[in-house]
Image (cartoon, rainbow, N blue to C red):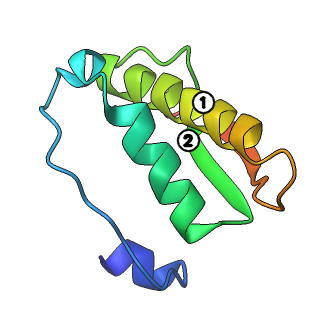
Amino acid sequence: QQAAKLLGLSSLQCWSEPDRSLEQSHDLPEKIAAAITDMQPASVFFPGPLEIHPDHRAAGIAVWSALQRVYLSNLQNDIKPEAVSYEIG
């Protein structure tokens, strides 16, 4: 919450996903897509798909999948956030 405040975020969502089992969460891309659609951010930052840590990699893949869903379902709307992936290391 402190990091979100420092970044100037007005809201924060935390989900109870299982540690080291994120790859098994099949509904995660849908939850992320819904959050993106609701929040309509200008940019979405997420870990790259080549991350070594399995949860970081799974999160990156889930966000990318969610962004594709958002882009395809909102072709006529302005909900097209910039996708920015990064490496955690």
**Looking at the image, which is closer to me, 76 or 36?**
76
Tell me if residue 23 comes above or below residue 86 in the rendering. Answer: above
Using the rendered image of the protein, determine whether residue 80 is visible from the camera's viewpoint.
yes
In the picture of the structure, the residue carrying the numbered disc 2 is: 46
Q: Secondary structure at mark 1?
A: helix
Label 2 with label 1: CB-CB less than 8 Å: yes
Amino acid type of the residue tagged 2 in the rendering: Phe
Amino acid type of the residue tagged 1 in the rendering: Trp
Q: Quadrant of residue 3?
A: bottom left
Q: State left or right for residue 71 relative to residue 61.
A: right
Task: Name the residue rendered at 29%, 76% in the picture.
Answer: 1
Q: CA distance from mark 2 to mark 1?
A: 8 Å
Q: Position of residue 50 (x, y in %)?
A: 55, 14
Tell me if residue 36 comes above or below residue 83 in the rendering. Answer: below
**Looking at the image, which is closer to me, 65 or 51?**
65
**Looking at the image, which is closer to me, 65 or 47?**
65
Using the rendered image of the protein, determine whether residue 86 is visible from the camera's viewpoint.
no
Q: Position of residue 5 (x, y in %)?
A: 42, 84
Of tags 2 and 1, the one toward the viewer is 1
In the picture of the structure, the residue carrying the numbered disc 1 is: 64
